[in-house]
Image (cartoon, grey):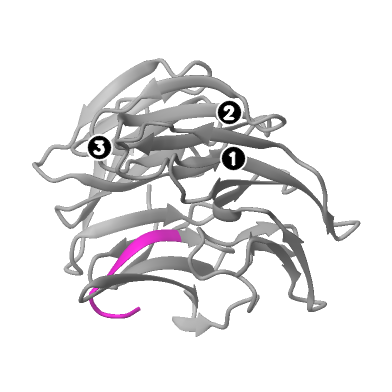
Amino acid sequence: MAKKADITHVSFFSATQVLLTAVTKEPHRHRSSRSLWDVTTTARVPPAIPTFSAHSFGELRSGEWCIGAATQNGLAAHHPATGRTVVEPTDTKPTHITLTPDGRTVLFCWSLGQRPSQNGFASRSWSPEAEAFGAGFRVATVVSDDNALQTYRCEALLPLPDGNRFVTVEWNWVFLPKLVVRSVSTGEALAAASIAGREAPSVGVAPDGSRVVVAVLKSLYVFSADDLEQERHIKNDGRKHFTGIAFHPSGRYLAATSNDQTVKLYDTESWQVAKTYTWDVGRMRSVAFSPDGTLAAAGSDTGKVVVWDVDV
C-alpha cells in the first residue's frame, strides 16, 4: 500500500485473498482506495469489477458471485468465471453494504447528503440462479434539527448469523452514536443502545450471534444481541484507544487493535488478554481472521499490513 495511509479496513475476500480499504493522508484532502492482495504470493490482484466503486465499503461474496456498490448509484454483481456483470440502479447512493449469511439479501446504507439530513437503510434481494436483483425495503431516517452540523451517518453495518437481523451504528452531531438491531425483512429498529463517546466505534458480531461487541475510545462494550443489554465493560490495559475488532470464527477469541501498536487477543469467556502481538509497523488500525481461523491480518497507519498464522 501507499505510504502515509491508514489501512482502515481489512477483510479476507477468500481463504487466501485480503481486501484492504485505505485512507491516504495527503495535504488538504483524504482519498480512499481499495486493493486486493494474494497472501500466498504477496502480489496485488486486479480488481474483479471495473464498475465497482472505490469509495464504498468492501466487496462481498455470494457463492461464485462478487457483490459490491457500483460506481454510479446502484449495486453490481459480477461472476468472474463467466465475465457477466449485473447492475441494479438505486435512486440513492449505497455507502456501507453487507450480505446476509445465505448471500441472498444485500443490505446497505444510503445517503442524500442534504439538510435536513435524510438518510436510511435499504435492501435488495439477490438470486444467483436467476442472475438478478429483486425488491427489498427502504427505510428513511430523518434528522430535522437545523443546528445539525453534519448529516446522519451510518458507521457500521453487520448481519447477524440468524439471517433475520442486522446491526448498525448510527449517529450525527446532535446525539451520541447508537447501536441498533434492525429487521432484514423490513428495516425496522428492533432494539437500540447508546454508545459512549463521539468517535466512530468498531463493531463485531459473535459467530453464534449471541453478542455484539463495540470498541470505542479505551473501552470494549459487550452487548446481548437479543435486546442490546450491556453485559460487560472491558478497559484497555494501556492509555491508547482501540481502533478495530474482529471475532475469531470459533467465537472463543476477540482480536482488538489499538494505537499502542499492538493486536490483543481476548478470551471471550474471561475477557482477559490471552495473547499480545506486536510489530514495528506503526499504530494498528484494523484486523480480520480468515474464514477457517488459521490466518489473521492487521493494517496499520503506515500503509503496512501484517498477515500471520493464528496459533491459539
Q: Amino acid at mark 1?
A: Phe
Residues at marks 1 and 2 touching, judged by CB atoms closer than 8 Å: yes
Query: Separation of disc 3 and disc 2 at Cα?
Result: 22 Å
**Residue carrying label 1:** 121
Which segment did they paint magenta? 1-10
Mark in front: 1 vs 2: 1
Instruction: Work out whether 310 lies above or below 31.
Output: above
Which mark identifies residue 182?
Answer: 2
- Please state which of residues 35 and 266 is positioned toward the viewer in this rendering: 35
Which mark identifies residue 194?
Answer: none
Q: Mark 1 vs mark 2: which is more N-terminal?
A: 1
Question: In x, y percent, where is residue 198?
Answer: 25, 37
Residue 37 falls left or right of residue 266? right
User: What secondary structure is the stretch in magenta mostly built from?
Assistant: strand
Q: Check disc 1: other Cα within 10 Å, few if <14, some if 14-19, many if 20+.
A: many
Question: In x, y percent, where is residue 15?
Answer: 57, 63
Q: Check disc 3: other Cα within 10 Å, few if <14, some if 14-19, many if 20+.
A: some
Q: Mark 3 vs mark 1: which is more N-terminal?
A: 1
Residue 47 falls left or right of residue 116? right
Residue 90 falls left or right of residue 293? right
Residue at the (57%, 51%) spot, across then down: 97
Q: Check disc 2: other Cα within 10 Å, few if <14, some if 14-19, many if 20+.
A: many
- Determine the residue located farthest toward the left in the rendered image: 239
Residue at the (39%, 32%) spot, across then down: 213
Question: In x, y percent, where is residue 37?
Answer: 48, 76
Label 2: which secondary element: strand
Residue 105 falls left or right of residue 216? right
Q: Mark 3 vs mark 2: which is more N-terminal?
A: 2
**Residue carrying label 3:** 198
Label 3: which secondary element: loop
